[in-house]
Image (cartoon, helix red, strand yellow):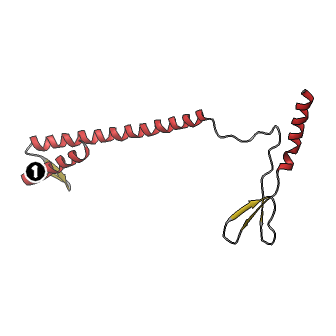
Amino acid sequence: MHLLALTTCWLLALSAPAMAAQVYKWVDAQGVTHFDAQPPQGQDAVQLDTPPPPRPGSTTPRSPPANQGAAQQRAIDAKVRAQVNADQARLDEYCERMRTNLAQLKINPRVREKVEGGVRPLSEDDRQARITEMQQAIMQNCE
């Protein structure tokens, strides 16, 4: 029984090169593409190069293990999460600055602004226009 199994294994191992037959490709008159081990009679056929069969005991390159892909995904997720948190922190800082400026404009009627080489007081119309601008900016970006 063991001799039969051993003989069968040897025959299968030695027959692998015989299974690597040549493949031909051609297109018939109806436009259908065919693949076969025998070229057709009276038609042009292209001989395709087929890779040799793997040798017994050889290893084939494998894709990375699933856990490595999961680790890469976790690293990318952490990077994106950090970026989102940094963006949110910048937005929070911006909104706090805008709300502080709005409070200054509402509470202090004598607001001054820096202009070329000096400081000038804002007119009431300018102050009201800036209050409206700040409120709109806060509504669009902060709420």
Q: In this rendering, is residue 114 above or below 8?
A: below
Query: Residue type at mark 1?
Result: Gln
Foreground pick, 91 / 67: 67
Q: Secondary structure at mark 1?
A: helix
Residue 130 location (% of width, % of height): 15, 51
72 sits left or right of 112 in the view: right
Foreground pick, 74 / 1: 1
Query: Residue at image x 50%, y 35%?
Result: 74
Give the quadrant of the N terminus. top right
Q: Which residue is mark 1?
A: 128
Count of numbered marks: 1
71 sits left or right of 117 in the view: right
Residue 30 location (% of width, % of height): 67, 70
Give the quadrant of the C terminus. top left
Query: Residue at image x 88%, y 36%?
Result: 8
Instruction: Residue lying at the far top in this picture: please name it.
Output: 1
Q: Quadrant of residue 66?
A: top right
Residue 129 location (% of width, % of height): 12, 53
Query: Residue at image x 65%, y 40%?
Result: 63
Foreground pick, 76 / 21: 21
Q: In this rendering, is residue 121 above or below 11?
A: below
140 sits left or right of 30 in the view: left
Q: In this rendering, is residue 108 above or below 50?
A: above
Residue 7 location (% of width, % of height): 91, 34
**Number of residues whose C-alpha sits closer than 10 Å to that of mark 1, classed few (under 14), some (14–19) or many (20 or more):** some
